[in-house]
């Protein structure tokens, strides 16, 4: 991580391990991979009132950081490491 941050200018992000259904739908993980994901029962946990799942990769929460945003070309590329 240090190399990516210090030498290449990436921004380090500590992502959550649990996300809601809409986050997984936004990255096209659901409904296609629902049988492969680890869901959390609603009796024990929800995520913002939605079904909760463990993340398959850090890509899901990282991508959702910019969900429903329009990024300006001048702001790209955005480089994250998680």
Image (cartoon, rainbow, N blue to C red):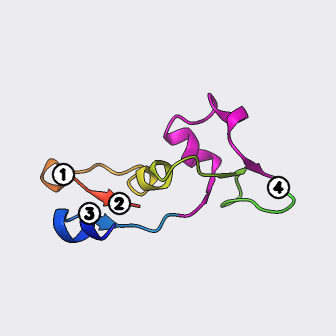
Q: Split into 4 quadrants, where in the image is the N terminus?
A: bottom left
**Which residue position is annotated with label 4?**
42
Q: Identify the disc placed on residue 81.
A: 2
Magenta part of the protein: which range?
16-40
The percent position of residue 76, horizontal first and vertical second, equals 18, 51
Q: Which residue is mark 3?
A: 4
In-front residue for pair 51/55? 55
Distance (Cα) linking label 4 and label 3: 37 Å
Q: Which percent across, then down, holds residue 46?
A: 74, 59
- Report the residue at 72% width, 33% height from top: 35
Q: Are marks 2 and 1 in contact (CB under 8 Å)?
A: no
Q: Is residue 2 left or right of residue 55?
A: left
Q: Quadrant of the C terminus?
A: bottom left
Q: Residues within 10 Å of mark 4 (few under 14, many from 20)?
A: few
Pointers 2 and 3 in contact (C-beta within 8 Å): yes
Camera-side residue of 58 and 22: 58
Query: What is the CA distance from the residue labelled 2 to the residue labelled 1?
Result: 15 Å
The local secondary structure at tag 3 comes to helix
- Comparing labels 2 and 3, the label whose residue is closer to the camera: 3
Element at label 2 = strand
Mark 4, secondary structure of its residue: loop
Marked residue nearer the N-terminal end (2 or 3): 3
User: Total label count?
Assistant: 4
Gap in angstroms between the C-alphas marked 3 and 1: 17 Å
- Alpha carbon of mark 1 to alpha carbon of mark 4: how far? 38 Å
Question: In whole angstroms, how far apart are the C-alphas of marks 2 and 4?
Answer: 31 Å
């Amino acid at each position: 991580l240090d190399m990516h941050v210090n030498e290449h200018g990436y921004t380090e992000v500590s992502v959550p391990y649990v996300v809601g259904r809409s986050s997984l739908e936004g990255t096209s993980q659901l409904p296609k991979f629902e049988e492969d994901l680890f869901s959390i029962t609603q009796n024990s946990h929800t995520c913002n009132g939605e079904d909760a799942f463990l993340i398959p990769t850090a890509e899901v929460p990282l991508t959702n950081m910019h969900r429903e945003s329009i990024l300006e070309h001048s702001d790209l590329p955005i480089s994250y490491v998680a």
